Structure formats: structure tokens, C-alpha cells
Amino acid sequence: MDKDIKFLLEKLKDKKYLVVLTGAGVSAESGIPTFRGTDGLWKEFKSEELATPQAFSQNPELVWKWYEHRREIIKKAEPNPAHLAVARLEELFPEFMLITQNIDNLHRKAGNKKIVELHGNIFRYRCSNDGRIFTNLPESDEIPPRCECGGYIRPDVVWFGESLPEDALNVAFQSSSSCDVMFVVGTSALVQPAASLPALAKRNGSFLVEINLEPTPISSIVDKSFFAKAGEILPEIVTKLCDTMSS
Ligand code: BJW
């Protein structure tokens, strides 16, 4: 592993613009379940019954309660060493963007500021009828609560079949097509359009680094893979990067 990190540090020399793309795997060591894989949420729950607009229309109470349950788990979670290392990377590179598919706020809690949330945020809510955004919920005995307009309030996250927030997507495309290096951390790289960002970066000459427990569909195009826990390898890379920068 030392040899691999040395190789990476050599490649990072003189690189100015780093983009980090993260997925659920980066929060796994904080105790938040991933979606796919043996312990993933989709083993126990059906995505089409919980993470689609159709599911919310058919059974709003079930979907609301599932998100409440997940929000309780996330509230108790703290950033792990992988989140802290990503926050440090923002300080080390003159240009930086963090693109996350996660809705759990842990990158912000760890200290990152330049963040694009592609799939929304579980601590924000939106009226399913008029689109009004809520950070605090109105007092209500109903589940889910309703907006003044009568529409049900839903979590402000992106479900299958829904468009991603336009501004976030534009920043993600723009930064991916102009960065010098992209780290892709803890994502199965199966869900579009996020999964196409590494290929976009590569087409525009970026050096691609993947950190995951196992190979993914993008492993064949990356320049360097680290098959390890993000919470172990990222801090190691960042510590060594700091050493080389200060020497
Ligand atoms: C570790 C680790 C450790 C573990 N260290 N690593 C064909 C072509 C193009 C598009 C489509 C298509 N067919 C269907 C689509 C559309 C669909 C899609 O991509 N489906 C695919 C599944 C096929 N996409 C959409 O619908 C998107 N919208 C869209 O495309 O709009 C335009 C359009 C509309 C209609 C039709 C066509 C186009 C919206 C996607 C929204 C995704 N929403 C979710 C839920 C968010 C809210 C919530 O949290 O409940 O987002 S689904 C879920 O997947 C969540 C995640 O952000 C997303 C990605 O998952 P992620 O982060 O990669 O997690 P995992 O679990 O998959 O992987 C974890 C990884 O970590 C694993 O690899 C582990 O090995 C690793 N790991 N521990 C390092 N310690």
C-alpha cells in the first residue's frame, strides 16, 4: 500500500483542482447503512416501495416513517476519519469541489464547505404539491404533515425517476469536466447521472482515483484503485500528502 500511495502522491504533484465524489460507503463507518451489498438497505426494503414518487403517492405514511427512522439513525451519527480526511483535502487544494450523493449532512459536519448535494438532504423537507421548502416542520398530528396548500410534505431528497436539482447538477458537470484529479469514494457507481461523472472527468484529462471495498463498473477506467476502507486509506493518503507538502 505504501508503494501505491507514493505513486499517487507523485501524480498529485502540481495538481490544483481536486473533485471528490462520494457515496454511501463513506458514511458506512459512521454506522449509516449503504443501499446495495449484503448489509445494504435494498436487501431488506424494496426501493420501488420507498424511494420513488409513486411509492409516496400510494403510501405516504409508510415512506414518511421510513425516512423518520433513517433520520433518527443519521442524527446519532458522527463524521468518521474518511469525512475528516475529505474536509482536510478541501484545505489542501487551491480549487476543490465535493460532490456527494449522500443526504446525511456528515460532510458538512466534518467541515467541508464547497459541497454539492446531488440527491438532496434528509434534514430538509418539500411540499409535494407546491414545492415549498421547509427546514422546520409545521405542527401537525398528521403523518406526513401537510403544507398550507394541503399537499403532503415529503423529504427533500431525490427518488428514482426524479430529476436532480438543476443547480447542483450543473456544478457537478462543470467541476467534473474541469478538474485535474477526481477521487471517487464509497459509491457502487450504478446510479445515474452521478455514475457518469468519473467518465466525464476522465474524458477531460483528469486523473481518476477510486476508493472502495471492491471493484465497481468504473474500476476499468480509473488510473489508481485502492480497495480498502475509506476511513483507513483516506487519512493515510492525506497525512502523507501533508508531509510531502510541508517538506
Ligand atoms: C465502502 C465502504 C467503506 C462500503 N469504504 N467503500 C439507465 C440509464 C440512465 C439512467 C437510468 C437508467 N435506468 C434507470 C435510470 C435512472 C435511475 C438510475 O440510475 N437507476 C439505476 C439503478 C439503473 N436514476 C434516476 O432515476 C435518477 N434520476 C434521473 O436519472 O433523472 C432523469 C431520468 C428520469 C427518469 C428516467 C430516466 C432518467 C435519480 C436517482 C436518485 C437516487 N436516489 C437514491 C435515494 C436518495 C434518497 C435516500 O437516501 O433515500 O440515492 S437511491 C440510492 O442510490 C441513493 C444513493 O445516493 C444512490 C447511490 O448509491 P451509492 O451511494 O453508490 O451507495 P451503494 O450502496 O450503492 O454503494 C456503496 C458502495 O460503498 C459500495 O460499492 C461498497 O462496496 C462501498 N463501501 N463500505 C469504502 N467503508
Image (tube, rainbow, N blue to C red):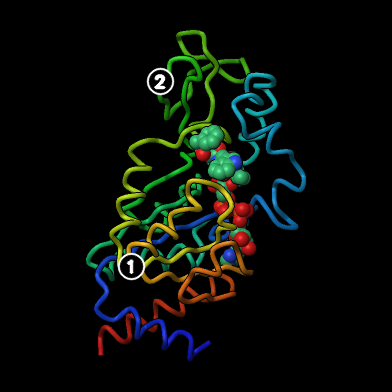
The residue beneath circle 1 is: 205
At mark 2, the secondary structure is loop
Residue closest to the eye, 139 or 242:
242
Could you classify mark 2 by the number of other residues whose Cα lies within 10 Å: few (under 14), some (14-19), or many (20 or more)? Answer: few
Q: Is residue 82 above or below residue 59?
A: below
* Residue at image location 33% in from the left, 38% down from the top: 167
Instruction: For ligand 1, tell me if the residue under mark 2 lies within 8 Å.
Output: no
Is 130 left or right of 54, judged from the image as shown?
A: left
Q: Position of residue 71 (x, y in %)?
A: 58, 40
Work out which quarter of the rendered image holds the C terminus and state it: bottom left
Residue closest to the eye, 91 or 9:
9
Is 229 left or right of 17, judged from the image as shown?
A: right
Q: Nearer the viewer, mark 2 or mark 1?
A: 1
Q: Position of residue 235 (x, y in %)?
A: 46, 75
Residue 132 is marked as 2
Q: Is residue 45 above or below residue 7?
A: above
Q: Is residue 16 above or below residue 28?
A: below
Which sits earlier in the primary sequence, circle 2 or circle 1?
A: 2
Examine the rendering and report whether any part of residue 74 can be seen. no
